[in-house]
Amino acid sequence: MKDYALEKFEEELDIGYQIYFTYVRNRYLIFKTSDNCYTQKLISVHDKNPQPAMQMLTKKRLEEIFPFMEDMEYKQN
């Protein structure tokens, strides 16, 4: 993960990849919706730590959480 840069991550979202990742013990799916807009869907559900099922993220928010993403997996339609 050390060699993996935010720019590469954004490129992969731009070309249509959907990316599963873990962030703060929750599993998510993220994909690009439009310019400066990404959709993040909650995959795992923890009753004691409720999170929004779906969120719209800006590029700035993506940059904030990127360093803390773990266990990335790719899906392409």
Image (cartoon, helix red, strand yellow):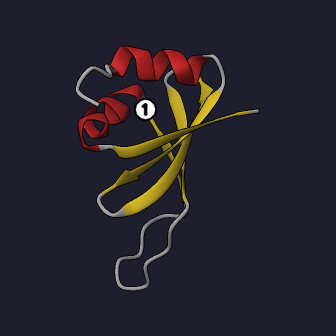
Residue 10 image point, x, y percent: 46, 20
Q: Nearer the viewer, residue 63 or 12?
A: 12
Q: Nearer the viewer, residue 48 or 33?
A: 48
Residue drawn where x is 40% and y is 26% of the image: 59
Residue 62 image point, x, y percent: 37, 33
Residue 9 image point, x, y percent: 43, 23
- Can residue 43 be seen in the rendering of this structure? yes
In the displayed structure, would residue 57 be above or below residue 7?
below
Say few, some or many: other residues with alpha carbon within 10 Å of mark 1 (under 14 / 14 to 19 / 20 or more): some
Q: Please identify the quadrant where the N terminus is shown.
A: top left
- Dividing the picture into quadrants, the one containing residue 33 is top right
Q: Amino acid at mark 1?
A: Thr
Residue drawn where x is 49% and y is 23% of the image: 36
- Can residue 35 be seen in the rendering of this structure? no
Horizontal arrangement in the rendering, residue 39 relative to residue 62 (left or right): right
Residue drawn where x is 49% and y is 74% of the image: 45
- Residue extending farthest bottom: 48
Secondary structure, mark 1, is: loop
For disc 1, the marked residue is 58
Residue 12 image point, x, y percent: 54, 20
Horizontal arrangement in the rendering, residue 53 relative to residue 72 (left or right): right
In the displayed structure, would residue 30 be above or below residue 43?
above
Total number of numbered discs in the rendering: 1
Q: Please identify the quadrant where the C terminus is shown.
A: top right
- Dividing the picture into quadrants, the one containing residue 3 is top left
In the displayed structure, would residue 75 be above or below residue 50?
above
- Residue extending farthest right: 77
In the displayed structure, would residue 37 be above or below residue 3?
below
Residue drawn where x is 43% and y is 32% of the image: 58
